[in-house]
Image: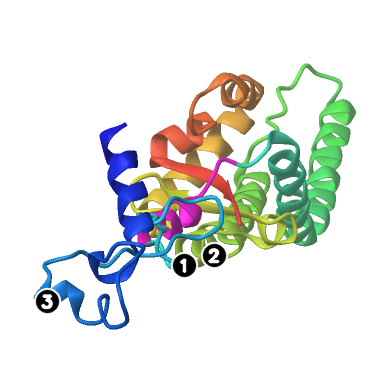
Amino acid sequence: APWAQQVHELARQGPGGAGPGAGPGAGTGGGTAGGGVVAVPGQQGEPAGVVPWRPPVNDPFASMVQEQGRPAGLGRRLAARLLDTMVVLAVTGVAAVPLGTAAYRHLKDKVDEARQTGETVTVWLIDGTTGVQLAIVLGVALVAGLLYEVLPTAKWGRTLGKKLFGLRVVDIESQLAPGFGPSLRRWLTHTVLDALVVGVVGLVWCMVDRPWRQCWHDKAARTFVARQ
C-alpha cells in the first residue's frame, strides 16, 4: 500500500530524512534544514512511524457502564423476600398471639352461651371485642412493614434480607434508592397482591419480564432489584 511504502522509505532514510550514506550531522537538525520528517520508532510488531491508539486508563464511559445496576437473579430475590416476610410475621406475631388467644376465648364463651339457651342463635365472629383486636393486629403489621421495609428501601434501597443476599432496589432512571413514595407504593402493591393470593402470578411475570425482570410491584413503583 502507498502508506506502507512511505513508512518503509522513512525507516530506510533514518532520522532527519538523510539517506543511508549521509555523513555525520546529516540527520541532526535535518527536520529543520532539510525539510525531512522524523520517523517515530514503533513497538514490536508495529511499523515505524505509526503511533498506535491507546484507550485512556480511566475511561469515564466504561466506569459509567460498570456502575449501572444489573437485574438480580430470581433465586436470591425469593430468598430475600422469604426472610423479610418471616421478620415481619415474627414482629406481628408478638401482638397477634395474645390477642388471637383472647379472641378465641371470647368467641368460645359466646358459643357456649348460645348453646345454653336451647335456641338457634346467630353468633357473629366480628363484634366490638374481636374487631378491636383484629384492628390492633393489622396496625402492628402495617407499622412493622413501614419500619422494616418501606423506610430502609426508601433510604438505602434494601432491607435486611436484601442486604444479606447482595440485592438493592433502585429507580429505573436514576439507579438510586427509590425514595419514600415509590417504596410505599411498591410495598403496598405486593402486600395486597399477596393477601389476595395473586402474588404467585406476579412472580411468574417477573420470570418472563425483560430487560429489568420486574414483578408487578416493581412496575407500580418504576423500580427493579439489582445486584450490588
Q: Circle 2 — which element? A: helix
What residue is pinned by disc 1? 155
Q: Considering only order in the chain, which callout, 3 or 2, is on the residue closer to the N terminus? A: 3
Residue 75 found in image quarter? top right
Contact between labelled residues 2 and 1, with CB atoms less than 8 Å apart:
yes
Q: Which amino acid does label 3 sit on?
A: Thr
What residue is pinned by disc 3? 32
Task: Give the label on residue 22, or none.
Answer: none
Q: Which residue occupies 62% across, 23% down?
A: 207
Magenta span includes 66: yes
The answer to whether residue 86 is visible is yes
What is the span of residues highlighted in magenta in the rendered image? 60-71
Contact between labelled residues 3 and 1, with CB atoms less than 8 Å apart:
no
C-alpha gap between disc 1 and disc 2 = 5 Å
Q: What residue type is labelled 1?
A: Lys
Neighbours of disc 3 within 10 Å: few (<14), some (14-19), many (20+): few
Q: Which of 96 and 27 is in front in this view?
A: 27
What residue is pinned by disc 2? 152
Q: Which residue occupies 20% across, 81% down?
A: 29
C-alpha gap between disc 2 and disc 3 = 70 Å
